[in-house]
């Protein structure tokens, strides 16, 4: 009972100390930004990053509309997809250029979130990265949807050739009889989708790589926020002072070949045990996804969300 009480007290002190440190670091960061007048620099860096990203994506799309890596893609489909994505880039750049004069003021007001803690500032930086790469996310969603429809269409027509169909009510594959005209139309559609699949798959692979390149730093930022909010700082201070004890031992001290007294020694707790016992673990902020499920979603065209959502194909 005493152990549980001490552990509960340590957890409360860890939460309190982390909250205080988080607030102090956040307010110090806000004070530094306002003293150094860092907002115009951030706004110029923001616009420079957007322009560089837009120019790089435009060059990438022109490369995809040609013969990328020597591959012979469907020219008409590649040109249509390339022009479609280029139009979204022009829209995105035009929108950001419209709000550019107010960007420094918006950053100045957004920096006041640092009064809520440095973890809020880091989370805000992750959200800003999502806003900067929103067009990349749109490209990934469009390409994934088109690729997913083609893959599922090919699977459906492949079942048609084998005399089977998907039973929606029972959620299984059943045998079925098809007419000649149905088989003929299915063959035509299967051939069209099959020959268009390499072009769609190449666009999907490129934009999926860009999406994963954005998700990797966001996952690192999320891990940093979780580490900040779950780190047992108070317990670590107690451990450095030698106040974290794992047990006691008694040693007999001999005097004239007789046991004179008992020496009590405290056994210090290891750092690993301190971290495992007092780590503020938040199970709701953790998502454990296997590489098998992520790889399956990528191959079939399902969207990969940073929070680990699972969509159902309608």
Image (cartoon, rainbow, N blue to C red):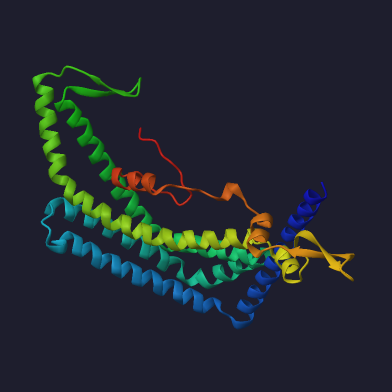
Residue 280 or residue 209, whichever sits in front: 280
The residue at 43%/41% (across/down) is: 310
Left/right placement of residue 56 relative to residue 96 reads left
Quadrant of the image occupied by residue 147? top left
Left/right placement of residue 18 relative to residue 169 reads right
Quarter of the image with the C terminus in it: top left
Residue 303 seen in this snapshot = no
Left/right placement of residue 22 relative to residue 295 reads right
The residue at 76%/53% (across/down) is: 7
Work out which residue is located at the far top of the displayed protein and give it: 177
Left/right placement of residue 202 relative to residue 123 reads left
Residue 205 in the image, given as x and y percentages of width and height: 27, 54
Residue 137 in the image, given as x and y percentages of width and height: 38, 55
Residue 219 in the image, given as x and y percentages of width and height: 47, 59
The residue at 58%/58% (across/down) is: 226
Residue 220 in the image, given as x and y percentages of width and height: 49, 62
Residue 103 seen in this snapshot = yes
Q: Is residue 280 positioned above or below 109 on the image?
A: above
């Amino acid at each position: 009972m005493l152990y549980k009480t001490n552990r509960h007290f340590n957890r409360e002190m860890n939460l309190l100390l982390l909250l205080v440190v988080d607030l102090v670091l956040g307010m110090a960061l806000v004070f530094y930004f306002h003293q150094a007048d860092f907002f115009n620099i951030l706004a110029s860096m923001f616009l420079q990053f957007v322009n560089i990203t837009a120019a790089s994506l435009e060059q990438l799309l022109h490369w995809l509309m040609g013969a990328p890596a020597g591959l012979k893609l469907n020219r008409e489909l590649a040109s249509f997809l390339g022009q479609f994505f280029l139009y979204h880039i022009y829209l995105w750049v035009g929108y950001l250029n419209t709000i550019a004069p107010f960007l420094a003021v918006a950053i100045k007001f957004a920096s006041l979130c640092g009064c809520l803690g440095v973890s809020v500032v880091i989370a805000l930086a992750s959200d800003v990265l999502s806003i900067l790469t929103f067009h990349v996310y749109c490209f990934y969603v469009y390409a994934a949807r088109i690729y997913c429809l083609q893959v599922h269409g090919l699977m459906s027509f492949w079942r048609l050739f084998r005399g089977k169909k998907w039973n929606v009510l029972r959620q299984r594959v059943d045998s079925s009889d098809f007419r000649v005209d149905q088989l003929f139309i299915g063959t035509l559609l299967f051939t069209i989708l099959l020959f268009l699949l390499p072009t769609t798959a190449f666009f999907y692979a490129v934009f999926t790589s860009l999406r994963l390149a954005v998700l990797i730093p966001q996952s690192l930022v999320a891990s940093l926020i979780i580490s900040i909010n779950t780190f047992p700082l108070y317990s670590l201070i107690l451990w450095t002072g030698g106040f974290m004890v794992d047990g006691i031992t008694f040693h007999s001290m001999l005097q004239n070949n007789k046991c004179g007294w008992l020496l009590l020694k405290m056994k210090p707790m290891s750092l690993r045990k301190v971290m495992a016992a007092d780590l503020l673990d938040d199970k709701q902020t953790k998502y454990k996804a296997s590489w098998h499920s992520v790889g399956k979603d990528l191959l079939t065209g399902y969207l990969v969300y940073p929070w680990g959502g699972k969509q159902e194909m309608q």
